[in-house]
Amino acid sequence: MLVNRKLILAHFWLAFAVFGVALTLGAWQMFIRSPIGTWLSNPELYYRSLTAHGTVMGYVFPTLVAMAFGYAISESALQQRLVGVRWAWAGFWLIVAGSIMAVIPIALGRASVLYTFYPPLIGNVFYYLGVVLVVVGSWIWVALMSVNLRVWRKANPGAPVPLAMFANVAGSYLWAWTAVGAALELLLQIIPVAAGLKATIDAGLARIFFSWTLHAIVYFWLMPTYIAYYTIVPRAIGGRVYSDSMARIAFILFLVVSMPIGMHHTFADPQVGAGFKFIHSAFTALVALPTLLTVFTICASVEIAARLRGGRGMFGWIGALPWDNPMMLALAFSFVMLGFGGAGGLINMSYQLDASIHNTQWITGHFHLIFGGAIVIMYFAIAYDLWPHLTGRELIDIRLIRTQLWLWFIGMIVTTFPWHWVGILGMPRRMAYFDFGDPAIAPQALSVTLSAIGGFILLASGIMFIVILARGMRAPQIDAGPYRFALAVHQPTTVPVALNTHALWVALMIGLTLTNYGYPILNLALSSGTSVPAVYVGAQ
Amino acid sequence: MSTRDLFTLRNSHFRTGVGITAAILVVTAIAGFIVLPFAQPWVQFAGVWDAICSAAGVPQRAASVTAPEQAKRLSEVVLTSNTLSRPSQEAIGRGATLAQRCAICHGPTGVSRADSPNLAGQYAAVIYKELHDFRSGARTNAVMSPFAVNLTDQEIADLSNYYAYLPRLPAYHPTPQLPKPNIVIYGAPMRGIAPCGACHGSLDNKTGSPWLEGQSEAYMKAQLHAFASGERRNDISQQMRNIARAMTPQEIEQAAAYYASQPPDVVKAVD
Ligand code: HEM
Ligand SMILES: [Cu+2]
């Protein structure tokens, strides 16, 4: 039952519109610093673009997708009209206002600080305020998800919360808590300096606050994708979820262990004690667990679909899968990219190996493969799956959809594999210019050129995606029926309270944050002499 | 069902969830704070508590090691982009009076007729820093140092404000404008050299970096060589020494000739 379709469509459209712009900037960045582009002679323009690209792709786009999908889940999984529609619109407009507020200083070159903020570099205060507004808008969504679940619980005491909603609310709590780190950094440290109230900043502390946000935000980006794996894919390909409890446990584990591990981003930082780095590193190893559970459960669910379609044999069933179904294709591509990206992640998370790829192009290659590849391709799949239910019109271009997914997959591999490679060779990231005429890096020209070509394939695929959705707004009307989520092999009738509520896991999440972050933060916050003068963008 | 049935040891999920989490935390903490510190034979700890404090990152003062005595003085100036950003008219007036002694080398209008640097319209923070460094001995020059040693903080600030206030006049011997050489706009990334223009104008300006348009070519070349040889060492964190050391003599020529040939109104366009 999708009642507030306009609300959901508004979120999706805004998400995909800003995505289109940021994607174009990304392709331009690739081109301009590759041997095929001529250098613009002004690195500042590159960093403007990079700030816009990172801010949109990291904060605005995935948040809007999670919100749109979350509202859709709340209405269709709970079979209940959204409570608090006005608040939801308020959240949406806050994000619009915040995005505009942030983009103006970026475009003017007053906030080229990159999406990780990079204090003591300080940009125009409106950039940061804009980001804060975006986060506040998304917090309204968090509250609404919680409220809607509560309303449903009152009406259905003791009933198992549908898996999609359980996971959705888990994702929203994760976001609410992980955003606190960056919020503290912005409100207590950066904004006072940007507003001219202070002239020094503790950059080391700021980096710790940011690491609080930086890891779990990745799992927040991932949530819609994982929800789609469990609750859309099996239904779309005619199978069933292998285990409902396993799914719940995976989402619970994300809630508990994706938070207290962010300091794996500060391995190279001197202001963090080695003992804390070790604890964060050990917990990072644990976060692979829910992903392994997911890969197992989804493969089993897909096998069920294949066997129901008459697939036989140890591996023979793979051929029986509906490979012409876009959802099947998206899942397969997503898993392949997740596999390669996950293997790369093992290198990032180990203290010693990380030293060899720290701050190199490997890192950007890695997160584009996982985030831009494995995660975003499922965002596409979610949109395709929901679109007929939101517009009441059919998506007729199935072949075009398949081509689009193929292009995204190929483009992502072509972009990111050479990207990783030049990183291993030591090419630093976030550089506006490389002199490929220099014999020391001339051999890398080929790899970087390949990456740039991959970037244009991605751009083409992104444009196709938007065109397909836009054409879907004018296609013939159909009755798409109610929007359904996948059923489990054993659909639960009762669920233990621990697997049906979030309280215990949220408590553990907060507890581990305190144990793993408490001392390092207090230590820096209470020591004197840890601040440095701010460096203002564009100031003499 | 309520959370009252959840947060109790009778609930097996609660027992397992909290138990496993706590166990992992304790085991990793023991490994990270006790086992691993002692696994490094090259580090000596006074005891377990010392190891834990070290692994936690508790700020410690290494007991017996005294800071090495710096053979030569380094700059102690701290600059922010707010340094001297709002001068008063009186400050500028006082600076004008003081500047009479400087005119013999730096010119009555702040434009030098010798190969001393031009100061007219230079950023206040730049003059402020150099005067401080001459006074402290972080930078030395047979002619300049005696003028600086007796200046008070107030006088340094006033002089800086005065010169920053002066209009930027063309150099005394203007030459035809040269095109931008690679070192100025691209730097030399493989040798770790950022473009000169990223700090000194042409592309961007950074706090504490002077604009260079119209400066004497001989003066700039001499300074780059002094940075490269380490004879001049008042650049904060070796910012200029690192660059100058990596520059080729030819690049030094090109950069100096380029900046010397630029009229100062180029600067106005960018700041
Ligand atoms: C056409 C496809 C894309 C291309 C060619 C591209 C290219 C780039 C480039 C060149 C950078 C800068 C790397 C550096 O200098 O360190 C970058 C950064 C980034 N990209 Fe992309 N990108 C693309 C798509 C995406 C997608 C789909 C996402 C995520 C949804 C994404 C997220 C990011 C983020 C978060 C950053 C970090 C910004 C920063 O370091 O400040 N990109 N991208
Ligand atoms: Cu991380």
Image (spheres, grey):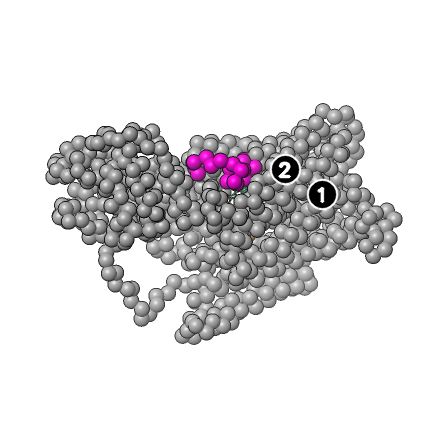
Q: Is mark 2 within 8 Å of ligand 1?
A: no
Say which residue label 2 marks: A457
Give the amino acid type for the residue marked by disc 2 in the picture.
Ile
Asked if residue A229 is among those painted magenta in the image, a careful observer would answer no
Where does the image place residue B97, in percent across and percent down from the top left?
12, 35
Give the amino acid type for the residue marked by disc 1 in the picture.
Ala
Callout 2: few (<14), some (14-19), or many (20+) C-alpha neighbours within 10 Å? many
Is A40 placed above or below A509 here?
A: above
- Tell whether label 2 touches label 1 (CB within 8 Å): no
In which quadrant of this rendering is ligand 1 seen? Answer: top right
Asked if residue A35 is among those painted magenta in the image, a careful observer would answer yes
Where does the image place residue B240, in percent across and percent down from the top left?
32, 48
Report how many numbered discs are placed on residues in the image: 2
Q: Decide which of tag 1 and tag 2 comes sooner along the chain.
A: 1
Q: Residue at position x 44%, y 70% from top?
A: B51
What element does badge 2 sit on? helix
Where does the image place residue A2, in percent across and percent down from the top left?
72, 34
Magenta region, residue range: A25-44
What element does badge 1 sit on? helix
Say the numbered circle drawn on residue A330: 1
Parent chain of label 1: A
Closer to the observer: label 1 or label 2? 2
